[in-house]
Image (tube, grey):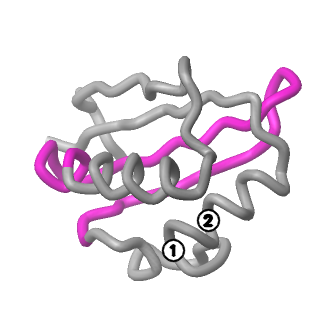
Amino acid sequence: MPVVLIHRTDWTQKEYERASEVLAGGVPKSPSDWPVEGLLSHAAGPVDGGWCVVDVWKDKESAEQFGQILQQRLSGAGLLKEGHDPVVFEAYNYVK
């Protein structure tokens, strides 16, 4: 079952781009740019004075593996902040 991660942060576009550089070597253009296999879709953009990222992963294992790498790399870059925990849920319905 696909798993959805919704990250709402107080980041700017520059911080998103920096996080993308740390995580994927640049702003990702393809699921193969991620450090973990299993990404089905990614969307990011400004919302309410911050930045929102929505990822859909093929399964819980892929999402958890990505979460571990994300925390390690963002923490190392000083981009991991309190209160930035994602909303995570299994998708009832996912349409490609």
Q: Dot 1 lies on which element?
A: helix
**What residue is drawn where x is 83% and y is 51%?**
13
**What residue is drawn where x is 63% and y is 72%?**
21
Instruction: Give the distance between the C-alpha atoms of the residues marked 2 and 1, in whole angstroms.
Output: 5 Å
Q: Quadrant of residue 4?
A: top left
The picture places residue 96, in percent across and down from the top left corner, at 38, 56
How many labels sit on residues? 2
The picture places residue 46, in percent across and down from the top left corner, at 81, 38
Are the residues flagged by discs 2 and 1 in contact, CB closer than 8 Å? yes
> Which amino acid type is marked by label 1?
Ala
The picture places residue 27, in percent across and down from the top left corner, at 66, 72
**What residue is drawn where x is 71% and y is 53%?**
16
**Residue 20: assigned label:** 2
Left-right relation of 87 to 28: left
Query: Is the magenta region chiefly helix, strand or loop?
Result: strand
**Residue 24: assigned label:** 1
> Which amino acid type is marked by label 2?
Ser
Does 24 appear above or below 95?
A: below
Q: Is residue 69 magenta?
A: no
User: 23 or 4, which is in the foreground?
Assistant: 23
User: 62 or 19, which is in the foreground?
Assistant: 19
Q: Which residues are magenta?
A: 37-64
Does 71 appear above or below 42?
A: above
Q: Is residue 58 magenta?
A: yes
